[in-house]
Amino acid sequence: MLKRLPSLPAAALALSLGGLAMAAPQGAPVDPAAAAAARPASVSRKLEPPRAPSSQTPSGALKILHVADVKPGMVGEAWTVFRGIKPEPFKVRVISVLKNFIPKQDVILVRAEDPRVEFSGIAAGMSGSPVYVDGKLMGAIAYAWSFAKEPLAGVTPIESMLAERARPIRGGASDSFYVQAGMPGADRASTEGSQLVPIAAPLAISGLSLNAFNEYAEQLKPFGLLPVRGAGGGRDKKAVVPNDALVPGAPVGVELVRGDMSAVAMGTLTYLEGDKLIAFGHPMFGIGEVNLPMVLGEIHAFMPSLAASFKLASPIVEIGAVVQDRPSCIVGDLSRRASMVPIEVRVSSPGSEGRVFRAEVARNRRLTPVLASMVITSAIADAEPDVTEMAVTMNSRLEVRNVGPVQLRDQLFSNDGMSPRLLASSRGVRAMAELLANPFEPAIVDRMEIDVKVEFRRDVAEIVAVSLPGDQVRAGDIVPLHVTLRPYAGPEYTQTIPVQIPRTLAGETVKVEVASGLLVRPDVAKPESLRGFIDNLRSFYTASSIVVSMSTADDGASMRGRLVPGLPQSALDTLRPGNQTRRADAYRLAERTVVPSARPVTGRQELSLVVREDVLGKNR
């Protein structure tokens, strides 16, 4: 496992973390011998080791400055990286202590007195920069104001961070942990400038087109992230990183996407002891026990901005896993590896060779579908960037652990290329979101594969009207239902669908709905287990089908995963007693006719009709 070796010569300290990361299985401790064996023969670059500030006694005990002993006017040093991986100090002065800033935690207010920081202000990516006073660790820079005229920052006391480091791991953290809406950062747009808020983690993104980046940047901001384009991934696996690179002030990040696309939220390491490190000084999502990849980063530039200065960074190598995401910091464990969801996208089109894109995304109930959609959009946009009429057929396959594959099909059309919003509506992406949010048990998606076929043609029609020969029909008759469709940039045409009126509908007023198969879900019972939930996902109509549904006020019942239609009231009363909650659910009876369409269709229309008695004058 990764440890500091202060007594070894510099040559012995050069350890290839790139080879180490490739050799270590997920969730297993790192073996230094295996890492050495996996070291590449050739090296493309060698990063300069940083100089680490010291806050330990000769015996190794940590010297800390307790918040109770902090006084206004104290002068100290904060350490952060302005370029490369080497931390540099800058002067800070204590202004005051804000008592009980968050529940049970004070925040120390400091002012930076260094020309670089006075010019830029407190920048995104400085979260976690350790602050020392008289050789004692006081805490980590974690809070700031946007548009501030003074380089003021809030420091999280080290006592609060060490308490989170000591918190035991329950061992039950799921790969599909949940992130609630409105987590830290969700309301920053309306409050920044007037409140001291957590410094945003710059989310370095690469591999996305400009349009895709702009759209997904808006979706990621509520997570407390500051999307930055142009320096996300492209790890140099041949890079030799000194073993003492992990020191207070070094750039560390949380990896959300890696591979042909990359997204890494970057911050700063505050303190490391053994295999445990603490960083950021504030939460990332604030969700407690987690399992996310942690990487060592490299800073390319310190970017001043009137709105929000930030560090332009990229990951170098995976070093461990984030195991705690708490109010005062994130906690990393160098002996662990976090699993991600592999995604493979294969894109083909007439007259061109198919292209394959591979990436992995972090496991998160709310964030994984967004990241998966981002990967798929990027792959299609890179393979077929034309902004024109485009018909896309997507075949998705999700491998669900202990359940098996879920295979889905989408037919999409756009008159200006594929957009993130259009792809987010696809069954594959929706199924990922629904699986991770299912109410029964954690669903672990081991892999996602997408086959995309792109055709440059106008291939969609909208249902604009439906009609019958009259407003009354007889039970048992087969009637012609005329469906008017309007193709994109083409004349309207009519498709006639023969529909049989069931004899059981005699004397009823019936609602007839005609819709694209994309908008209709088959009649399925309410699931009572994860397997039933997945079976329902597997049931769907395609977009190149027209679905005619006839519904009445008659009741049927859904009971223990099965549909029981057309029940008399006495049976319904028995299945839905008033003295218990576990009972049959009512549903409205529907008769369905499904017919193929010459092209994918969109939209829906409906009408009402009265069903007369059949030709024998009896209701059957």
Image (tube, rainbow, N blue to C red):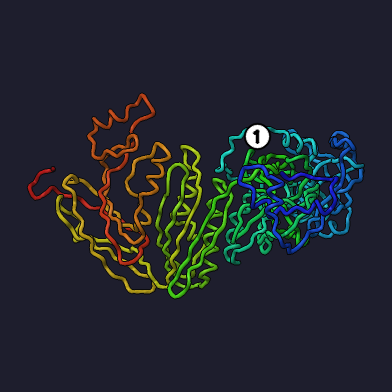
**Mark 1 — residue?**
169
The residue sitting at 70% across, 41% down in the picture is: 331
Disc 1 on helix, strand or loop? loop
In the image, farthest residue toward the bottom: 351
- The picture quadrant where one finds residue 155 is top right
- The picture quadrant where one finds residue 332 is top right
Left or right position of 601 against 612: right
In the image, farthest residue toward the left: 616
**273 up-or-down from 77: above or below:** above
The residue sitting at 28% across, 52% down in the picture is: 549
> Given the image, on which type of amino acid does mark 1 rest?
Ile
Left or right position of 201 against 242: left
- The picture quadrant where one finds residue 66 is top right
User: Residue 118, how many percent across, how many down?
Assistant: 85, 57
Left or right position of 464 against 235: left
User: Residue 450, how many percent across, how many down?
Assistant: 47, 58
* The N terminus sits in image quarter: top right
Mark 1: few/some/many CA within 10 Å (<14, 14-19, 20+): few
User: Residue 490, how many percent across, how many down?
Assistant: 35, 74
The answer to whether residue 522 is seen in the rendering is yes
Choose between 306 and 473: the one closer to the eye.
306
User: Residue 231, how many percent across, how many down?
Assistant: 68, 62
